[in-house]
Amino acid sequence: MKILFVCKHNRFRSRVAEAYFNKINKNRNLKAKACGLIQDNYPLDKDEVEVSKKLGINISGKPLGISSDLLDWQDLIIVVANDIKSSIIDENTKCGKKVIYWQIPDENNGNKENIERIIKQIMAKVDDFLEEEND
């Protein structure tokens, strides 16, 4: 199964999900990538990168936008964000592919404690997902 984690810009939430998933996943039949619905050139937030690194997750790199290649590649989209309308992604189900919504808000307000809380929430969702897939 090929999983595509999606958030709005691929600068934080989907990057955390992909990096953590790829770090802990032991099932070679599960692959993950991440992207954002909106491609932009904004740099990653220094605090988000720092807190992620402190928790053992590397989110460095250039944000990726969604593409037809990624949509063709994936078997499952996991929308990590709460600020993406389901109507944008639900076309995926018309192609016989699944969509899961995690609804994780990006309300860190530049606060490192909030950033850590969001990261841990994503980590817990990834842990739960992998546990279900490996049962």
Image (spheres, rainbow, N blue to C red):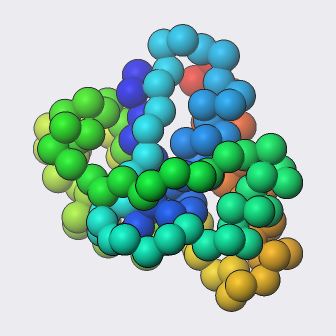
Classify the position of the C terminus by image quarter: top right
- The quarter holding residue 19 reads top right
- The quarter holding residue 119 reads bottom right
Q: Residue at x 61, y 72 (%)?
A: 45
Front residue of 83 and 108? 108
Can the viewer see residue 103? no
Front residue of 47 and 75? 47
Q: Residue at x 37, y 60 (%)?
A: 36
Decide if residue 133 is on the left or right side of residue 32.
Answer: right
Q: Residue at x 56, y 60 (%)?
A: 13
Decide if residue 105 is on the left or right side of residue 29.
Answer: right
Residue 105 rendering spot, x and y as whole percentages: 59, 74
Classify the position of the N terminus by image quarter: top left
Residue 69 rendering spot, x and y as whole percentages: 19, 37
Q: How many marks?
A: 0
Can the viewer see residue 63? yes
Decide if residue 26 is on the left or right side of residue 3.
Answer: right
Residue 77 rendering spot, x and y as whole percentages: 37, 44
Residue, far bottom: 109
Residue 51 rendering spot, x and y as whole percentages: 79, 62
Residue, far top: 28
Q: Residue at x 37, y 71 (%)?
A: 41
